[in-house]
Image (tube, rainbow, N blue to C red):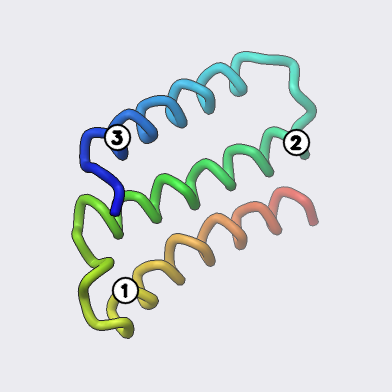
Amino acid sequence: MINIHFSAVILVLLTLVSTMLAQSTTPIGVLAFLVTLSVVVKGQQIIDVFMELNTAPAKWRWLLLSYVILVPLILAAIIYF
């Protein structure tokens, strides 16, 4: 199980990386993929660590995790297509 402090550090680092990517000259396709990946990882950390749903009934955990995965994928699909 991931420590809450370690998870907070991961969230801050992912936010900083996303901010640095936004300021860079990275192509939009790569940028969209990396930011989408960052959103998925951050959402998973929030659901499992901060909301403590890793011990909740599987139905509720997967319902929230599916939201965290589907919304960024839909947004990425809009950007790519």
Numbered badge on residue 6: 3
Three-letter residue code for mark 1:
Arg
Q: Residue at x 28, y 79 (%)?
A: 60
* Mark 1 or 3, nearer chain start: 3
Which type of secondary structure does the marked residue at label 3 adopt? helix
Give the foreground label among 1 and 2. 1
Q: Is residue 29 left or right of residue 48?
A: right
Please state which amino acid type lies under the numbered disc 3.
Answer: Phe
Q: Position of residue 69 (x, y in %)?
A: 51, 63
Along the line of sight, the residue nearer the viewer: 21 or 79: 21
Res. 33 image quadrant: top right
Label number found at residue 30: 2
Give the secondary structure at mark 2: helix
Disc 2 to disc 3: CB gap under 8 Å: no
Q: Earlier in the sequence, mark 2 or mark 3?
A: 3
In the depicted view, which residue is nearer to us: 81 or 59? Answer: 59
Query: Mark number for residue 61?
Result: 1
